[in-house]
Image (tube, rainbow, N blue to C red):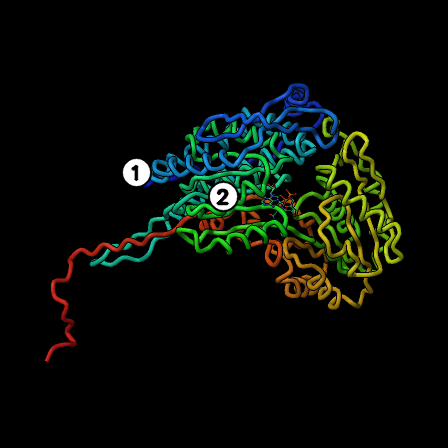
Amino acid sequence: MEKGFFNVPIAVNEQVKSYAPGSPERAAVLETYKNMFNTQVDVPLYINGEYVSTGNTRTMSPPHDHQHVVGTYHLAEQKHIDDAIATALEARKTWSLIPWEQRAGIFLKAAELIAGPYRSKINAATMIAQSKTIHQAEIDSACELVDFLRFNVQFMTDIYMEQPESTNEAWNRVEYRPLEGFTYAVTPFNFTAIAGNLPACMALMGNVVVWKPSDSQVFSAKVIMDVFEEAGVPPGVINVVFGDPVMITNTVLSHREFSGLHFTGSTFIFKELWKQIGTNIHNYKTYPRIVGETGGKDFIVAHKSANPKHVATAIARGAFEFQGQKCSAASRAYIPKSIWNDVKNLVIKDVKSFKMGSPEDMRNFITAVIHEGSFDKLAKYIDQAKNDTDAEIIVGGGYDKSKGYFIEPTVIVTTNPKYTTMCTELFGPVITIYVYEDDAYAETLKLVDETSEYALTGAIISKDRYAITQATEALQNSAGNFYINDKPTGAVVGQQPFGGARASGTNDKAGSAQNLLRWVSPRLIKETFVTPTDYRYPFLGE
Ligand code: NAD
């Protein structure tokens, strides 16, 4: 029981370190990278705080060096999923009842472990597993995950403080109960921070979790589990299972006590899971919460007043950092004819200056894409653009998977605003540009709004405030995160809550109190001080 109204530490964003040559953090992460790259790790399932080895294993290899093995991980069978669910439900009996400040203490500790002693390890693991440059690893696996953990504690107390009015006769209180049953986190490969946050934020609110990470992120997911364990997450509160996503999901979603899905990944999979939950709805004890952040076809619109350098830099960073594998990555751009030549020359110059290779060589801005499936898909679209008469590749277009899955950053220019790569999420270092007539600004904004099923991020670049206003209004439903004079990527927890609508997800804004509200079920308690003793109201008098 709490014995005080506690203030939590005021959340501050973790400072991004530079990793410049000669800096201590650069030396530390490179040494850790070498150690982790050259030793083999065995990653078990985590069920009830125990390491479960199933004997059925798969190897893990860095995308930039796919013949090199950095370890193995164990695949679950159905009985392991049943165990994970049973153990979570058992753990709920105590976890859902402990005072909130004890839960907060655990996750605040996890944040400081990542910011300090685990920083090199979680960054090196993300460089190896997901082929992130050190800067991309630092802003994701270290800083963003730390921010999620710190800010969520603050958001939790903000929620708890939200209370109804009371009177002298009755005291009204709202308790923010965890969901009844257990929750399910399904996470993507591309952000270690999202992988950690999805299970952690549900657990913070008192829920118990079965977490299924992406096969391509197991190596860094292990570091997250090491941190959670050291921070003191009790056995059974977060259980981790790897393996066949269909078998795992079928088992979870057919359980009567399933009460919430926290998903980040592709749109098609999310819609399928939603459908499955709908089909099972009569079996559940409660209506499950469904939160999903999914795909994007994120845009940059330049107005004729824009500075070509601003536009080119937004494209270079927004489209190509982390090989375009951010859900927010710019993948279509609309540039007015009058500035196109300048923008084109600057973009070509920037892209030609990118170095590509292993993240261990810190001069590289571009590394490999996540796996062979992604490589082959991207190569197919690039080949198609080489053959199509309404598309032209102005820079890039090469690819090579002999050592790692390397796709050259590629810029396609099309004369067809509905060209396939203007509409489809490719999830790689490819951007398609449509050049429009300067005086067709309004029509172009309409085109931007209508071209894709997604509505995740987008940017307007302009010096003209009327043009900015026009775009802000015309594109109000086209993006959940809308940027003015900036690239459409790089949301920071506590500053730019993140999420999109339409086919991009339920827009429950990761990194905000809104998201945490989905993981509680409020109970109103009204306590009356002087209880009535007669049912008759005055109006009933003679
Ligand atoms: P993915 O959909 O392939 O995988 C996501 C998760 O779903 C993984 O854990 C995977 O194993 C699991 N999964 C795959 N098939 C499944 C099935 N049939 N049943 C149940 N689970 C299944 O996505 P990914 O390649 O890991 O990530 C990239 C996608 O995620 C992109 O579409 C990107 O836009 C999106 N994404 C969105 C956001 C956002 O905030 N909107 C953030 C990151 C990534």
Residue that carries the numbered disc 2 in the rendered image: 252
Image coords of residue 242 (percent x, y): 57, 34
Callout 1 amino acid:
Glu
Q: Quadrant of ligand 1?
A: top right
Whether 72 is drawn above or below 475: the answer is above
Q: CA distance from mark 2 to mark 1?
A: 34 Å
Where residue 108 appears, as percent x and y from the top left, is 46, 34
Q: Bin the neighbour count of mark 1 within 10 Å (Cα to Cα): few under 14, some 14-19, many 20 and up.
A: few
Residue 15 coordinates in the image, percent (x, y): 58, 35
> Regarding mark 1 in the picture, which secondary structure is present there?
loop
The quarter holding residue 396 reads: top right
Quadrant where the image shows the C terminus:
bottom left
> Which residue type carries mark 2?
Val
Q: Is residue 170 above or below residue 494?
A: below
Tag 2: Cα neighbours inside 10 Å, few (<14), some, or many (≥20)?
A: many
Q: Is residue 120 above or below residue 520?
A: above
Closer-to-camera residue (11/222)? 222
Q: Which residue is mark 1?
A: 2
Residue 40's quadrant in the figure? Answer: top right
Residue in the picture at 78% in, 36% down: 406
Residue at the limit of the structure toward the left, as seen here: 542
* Residue drawn at point x = 47 percent, y = 27 percent: 229
Residue 128's tag is none
Frontmost residue, 152 versus 373 = 373
Residue mark closest to the camera, 2 vs 1: 2
In terms of image quadrants, where is residue 249?
Answer: top right
Residue 50 horizontal/vertical position (percent): 46, 26
Task: Classify residue 509 as left or right of residue 9.
Answer: right
> Which of disc 1 and disc 2 is earlier in sequence?
1
